[in-house]
Amino acid sequence: MASPTAKMSPLIMRVLAASVSVSYRAGTIIRDIMKTGDLGIVEKGKNDLQTEADRAAQRCIVASLHKQFPKVAIFGEESLDPSDKIPDNYVVTELAEDVLNHTCPEIYKNITDDEIVIWVDPLDGTAEFTQGLLDHVTVLIGIAVNGEAKGGIIYQPYYNYQSGPGTPMGRCIWGLVGLGSYGFTREVPPTNQNLITTTRSHSDWIVTEAVNACEPTEIVRVGGAGHKVLLLIEGKVHAYVFASKGCKKWDTCAPEAVLCAIGGSLTDMLGNQILYHSAVQRRNAGGVLATVQNHNWYVERIPPEIKENFVSDTPSEDMLKHKQQASTSAAADEVDSSTGAGDSSLSSTSKGDSGSSVDPPEFDKTKTNPDNVSAGPAKM
Ligand SMILES: Nc1ncnc2c1ncn2[C@@H]1O[C@H](COP(=O)(O)O)[C@@H](OP(=O)(O)O)[C@H]1O
Ligand SMILES: [Mg+2]
Ligand SMILES: [Mg+2]
Ligand SMILES: [Mg+2]
């Protein structure tokens, strides 16, 4: 039975709470499969592996979320046989109370099923998982609202795995833009340095050229988009630069939301917004560039001859319509507030209490107006 808090909670908070709960279960499934010693590796393509842990974790997450939110679109990385039997104990219907205890920001209160798309990467960092670099692995559940990354869960199943017996393994980081991000501690990144993280297993000369153009004092090559954004939010690196079309929407939706909820930015290499509506192309054809601050400085360092290889996402008709409606109602709010009757609209300032939210850095966010994007029609 759902608790009274759950019944009263807006849809976005329930989706977030269900995603947090199921991420713990997916983490257990991943660890259990690793313990069997039989990863059941399949080669999906060049330098692109899938294991039984990827398959099982996706079954668990998608079945659990679909059961609770049957009208919400859910996209997972792995192509699986829909007739596969899903064990009963894979279906989790709990809602994390620590999420529901937060007040939903006003702007999400009336969001409906058709405005949400969930992007699931059941195991991010598969290459490193198969090589025993276990702390590079994360489970990613991203929640897009009207095509924009707003909610995210990054579950790290092997956090603390080398800390010896008695230390609890695994941690869940979650965030919602307008509320804050929770489950980690942020440190101030080293000053007078420029630490840049990028791929460890999917590099090529453009990837390396783009990193070098950002004048790194050190390059941190690690696996997983989720893991790299964890390094960023914890203050261990200054930027994540990946000039490649290899990442997909499920790699970036959750990390982007968690990062943006503390005032950071994750865009393509051109500095344009990555979009997450259901018809968008799965590939991040614009590459990935993420920072907590000084985003523009990094975008400006990327030479035009690199930028010209990348293409930004195109908004859907629905998104454009929604944006128009939102700006019309924002204008109406402004009129209202000038008369003293207005409600406060969502600000990008994180309002975290005991969670790991940080004050927004002092820089202009570079997410540009979707009118700037230049791609052709979105394809599946
Ligand atoms: N060239 C490529 N081909 C396939 N997947 C790629 C890729 N480049 C990046 N990715 C995917 O993007 C994610 C982050 O990559 P990286 O670890 O190299 O930074 C990984 O997700 P998965 O491990 O979930 O497949 C990885 O497979
Ligand atoms: Mg991934
Ligand atoms: Mg994956
Ligand atoms: Mg993969």
Image (spheres, helix red, strand yellow):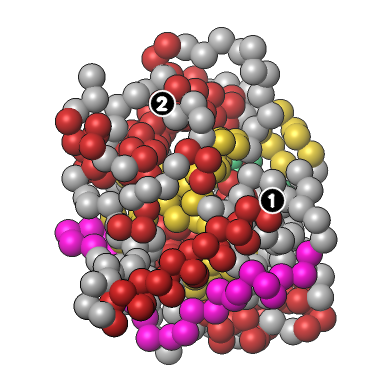
Rendered residue at 38%/86% (across/down): 362
Q: Position of residue 186 (x, y in %)?
A: 30, 67
Rendered residue at 17%/31% (across/down): 4
Return the mark for residue 311: none
* Amino acid at circle 1: Val
Return the mark for residue 68: 2
Rendered residue at 42%/11% (across/down): 88
Q: Out of 38 and 89, give the one closest to the viewer.
A: 89
Q: Out of 97 and 226, give the one closest to the viewer.
A: 97
Residue 16 horizontal side relative to residue 216, left or right = left
Dot 2 lies on which element? helix
Return the mark for residue 280: 1
Q: Quadrant of residue 44?
A: top right
Label located before the other in sequence (2 or 1)? 2
Q: Quadrant of residue 221?
A: bottom right
What residue span does the magenta drawing correspond to? 352-375
* 71 within the magenta span: no
Label 2 to label 1, Cα distance in Å? 24 Å
Relative vertical location of residue 76 with respect to residue 312 in this rendering, above or below: above
Rendered residue at 78%/48% (across/down): 379
Residue 122 horizontal side relative to residue 25, left or right = right
Q: Out of 340 and 54, give the one closest to the viewer.
A: 340
Farthest bottom residue in view:
192
* Amino acid at circle 2: Gln
Dot 1 lies on which element? loop
